[in-house]
Image: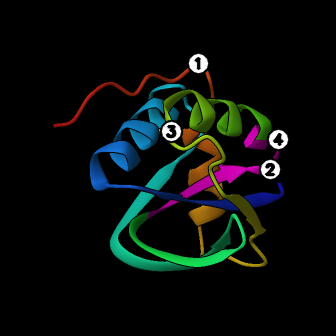
Amino acid sequence: MELFEVEVTCPDKDSARAIATACLKARLVACANILPKVESLFCWQGQIDSETETLLRLKTPAKHFDPVCEVIHRHHPYALPAIVALPVQAMGPGVADWVAAETQTAKTCEGSR
């Protein structure tokens, strides 16, 4: 199975958590990592700009990339969220199987413990 790690920067931890929760509940991803306080530098409207953002990483089968992008666009406050999918070349023993099992739509995943 081909796996992706999807990354998107968010303006804050709350928006990253909302996207992660929606993806988990829809069984599109097996895991989300939220990394706060990432400094982003970028060219916007002809000027170099910078923001402190939160990086969201999502582990998912490649076949779920388009639905994950739809969820991100639905919940993301930016007009153009910077979504990047990186192919996963290798994972530790059993991790790929876990991602496959956790992203089966017949399973349920509700709120936090």
Question: Looking at the picture, which amino acid does disc 2 mark?
Answer: Ala
Mark 3: secondary structure: loop
- The image's mark for residue 76 is 3
Q: In the shown orientation, is residue 98 left or right of residue 21?
A: right
* Identity, as a three-letter code, of the amino acid under mark 3: His
Counting residues from the start of the chain, the first of labels 2 and 1 encountered is 2
> What whole-number distance in Å separates the C-alpha atoms at marks 1 and 3?
26 Å
Q: As drawn, is 108 to the left or to the right of 86?
A: left
Q: Is residue 84 magenta?
A: no
Which residue is at 56% across, 53% downward? Answer: 98
Give the mark toward the camera: 4 or 1: 4
Q: Quadrant of residue 17?
A: top left
Instruction: Give the number of the mark in front: 2 or 1.
Output: 2
Q: Which residues are magenta?
A: 55-65
Callout 4: 10 Å neighbours few (<14), some, many (20+)? Answer: few
Q: Which residue is mark 1?
A: 106
